[in-house]
Amino acid sequence: MVSRRGLLRYGGVASLGGAASFGGIALGASQAQAAQATATGGPADERFWATVRAEFPLEEGLIFLNAANVCPASRPVVEKHLAYLRDIYANPSFENREKFAELEVEARQKLAKVLGAKPSAITITRNTSESTNTIVRGLSLRAGDEVIITSHNHPSNNASWKVLAKRTGVVIKEVPTPMENVSAERLARGIAGAMSARTKVIAFTHVTNTTGIRYPAREIVELAKGKNIWVHLDGAQSFGMLDFRLSEIGCDSYATSMHKWPMGPLEAGVLYVKDGRQDELWPSIVTAGYSELLEGVARFGVLGQRDDARMVAAGEAAVFLDRLGMANVEARALGLAAHLKKALTAVPGVKMLTPMEAALSGAVVKFRVEGKNTQELGRALWKSHKISGAVTSRGDLEGLRWCPHVYNTRAELDVAVEALARAVA
């Protein structure tokens, strides 16, 4: 059996060190210190990010640009997950596994720190979809109650509400997401225009996976203030990429996944429900271990037998982000996206579907090449340069989606754009 003390050498302690540093820059102190390090040539230096990239076991020659779908986990996360998996399988006794109760609490504390929330408001689920459906199925809505959604929401945040409507008579109002002349004011105005005295829920996406449009979350929450409207935010494309605090955004609930921008394990997600609204939810799953007396939102994470090692790894992913500093992560991701957008606009025939302004987008970069078959183009780029992005063939959203993150380099992006230019010439 691997003891807990023995496990200290896993999951970043050996790789990052107790006072972790990349390229000689200490990480995870505070946002102010992170900003200072950036200003003095630390994380603004490509050598710093080359050191960060070395923490990811990416295949040689792969240009991976699909963070909106799944990210590679860092070595500290992989090592911690594997170490605890070996521990469980070597000794699956109750006596050995009882330590995971404390480790799960610690993981929630680590996640809460990065998200800017109380640990009691956080629970670990299996993905964004499960977190969102906990809200959809948990709220007490009646026939005639209105739920506002947006057209570019992920299916887990649209289809689930529509299924509920069929079953209960809840009315769904779907607000179109603009593709042209996007502005924060226009995005908020669209939702405001759909509100009525019957509105009970507003469910929207922080950063869309379709075109990378960033909704003004705090402003939309303000629209619902004092109206007893539940505001649910899908953060699958924002957590692990944007620097924010849920306590400042003010939404009632937030759903996200660990396998995307947080660079954590697959099949681990987070559900946040703010204080004062947690008792308004009914559980969608009740099993052994469930109790209304569990701390805060933790009761909604009681889902039967779990992969305990995965939950520990989710906490390690939060530690990795914290050590990098979310201010640095956001600056790097948005910087890479800006570099990529600028380079793409120089390629003949490219039409950007993502706003050029950083304040209106995340690091999701969506574009298409006029007159070219998107599917064939995606396959050609994979075959010639192992460029892995996402391909959408659906209507006005048709295009290639490239999503760079902290493990990518500007040189990689330049290679990808050059390969695209040759493919469409």
Image (cartoon, grey):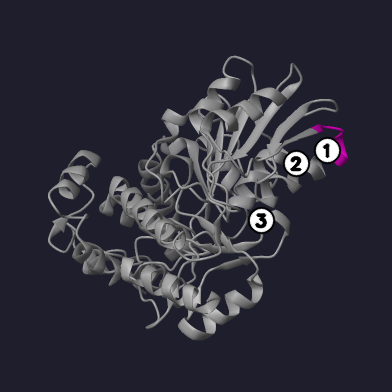
Q: Position of residue 319 (x, y in %)?
A: 32, 54
* Residue drawn at 70 percent across, 51 percent down: 155
Q: Position of residue 269 (x, y in %)?
A: 53, 53
Q: Position of residue 317 (x, y in %)?
A: 38, 58
Label 3 sits on a secondary structure element that is helix
Location of the N terminus (image quadrant):
bottom left
Which of labels 2 and 3 is toward the front? 3
Residue type indicated by callout 3: Leu
Residue type indicated by callout 2: Trp
Instruction: Give the extent of the magenta segment.
Output: 165-171
Asked if residue 383 is among those painted magenta in the image, a careful observer would answer no
Which of labels 1 and 3 is toward the front? 3
Query: Is disc 1 in contact with disc 2, using a CB cutoff of under 8 Å?
Result: yes
Residue 55 shows up from this direction? no
Q: Which residue is mark 3?
A: 397
Say which mark, if any, is on residue 161. Answer: 2
